[in-house]
Amino acid sequence: MSNPERTIKLISRSTVRLCLTVLLVIISNSLCYSQTEHNNKESSKWYGITGALGVSTFKETLTPFIKVDARILQPKKYKLRLGTTINYFFSENNDESKMYRNVFVQTEYLKHHRNEDYFGIGIAYLLDSHGNFYTKETFRLAFIKSLSFVELKGELTFNMNFEQMFPGIGISFGLN
């Protein structure tokens, strides 16, 4: 198989995987449901699966990501999320394009601030790594500002013994 044909095949496989992941996020957003206590809107808890698409920086590289979370929301009080984030890195070597997927599992706690604003903190652990972007036992600490459908993050990625630390920022859109 020639080089251009191999590149097209690789890109098409990567595109299919990315589209299927996006489809999963869209379907999971429609699975959100609520459990209301005492028919009082202020005391109702929302349980559900949420998702978001975004972009973040790592080592001066823009990396798109997809995020899926199981969430507990106490309106005007807190959000507690447990989920996964899949970061995608792209590289080109000798006319060959590659896409690398790196999977983090995370937990986040956000406290209500005002209106629809929430501030919080999150910690993530690298579960599955492809390529040479992360070392083993990589963690990510995030400081989070969440609005209705937009979320901003300041991130600090580091390995277990703090030998390497990389700051980053991220923005995502979806059901945060």
Image (tube, rainbow, N blue to C red):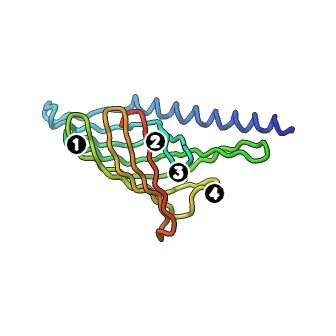
Q: Earlier in the sequence, mark 3 or mark 1?
A: 3
Q: Label 2 belongs to which residue?
A: 67
Mark 4 or 2: in front is 4
Q: Tell me which label, 3 or 2, sits earlier in the chain.
A: 3
Rendered view: 36 above or below 156: above
Kind of residue indicated by mark 2: Lys
Around disc 1, counting alpha carbons within 10 Å, would you say few (fewer than 14), some (14 to 19), or many (20 or more)? some
Q: Position of residue 49 (x, y in %)?
A: 38, 38
Q: Which residue is mark 4?
A: 132
Q: Residues within 10 Å of mark 2 (few under 14, many from 20)?
A: many
Q: Residue at point 39% right, 46% down?
A: 153
The residue lying toward the viewer, choosing from 121 and 43, is 121
Q: Position of residue 139 (x, y in %)?
A: 46, 60
The mark that comes first in sequence, 1 or 2, is 2
Q: Name the amino acid type tagged 3.
A: Phe
Q: Quadrant of the N terminus?
A: top right
Q: Which mark is residue 112?
A: 1
* Element class at badge 2: strand
Q: Secondary structure at mark 1?
A: strand
Asked if the residue at tag 2 contacts the one at tag 1, i.e. Cβ–Cβ closer than 8 Å, the answer is no
Cα–Cα span, label 1 and label 4: 38 Å
- Dot 3 surroundings within 10 Å: few (below 14), some, or many (20 or more)? some
Q: Amino acid at mark 4?
A: Asn
Amino acid tagged 1: His
Q: Are marks 1 and 4 in contact (CB under 8 Å)?
A: no
Q: Position of residue 117 (x, y in %)?
A: 26, 38
Residue 25 position within the rendered picture, expressed as x and y whole percent measured from the top left: 47, 34
Judged from the image, the secondary structure of the residue bearing numbered disc 3 is strand
Tell me the quadrant of the picture where the C terminus can be found.
top left
Count of numbered marks: 4
Q: Residue furthest right?
A: 2
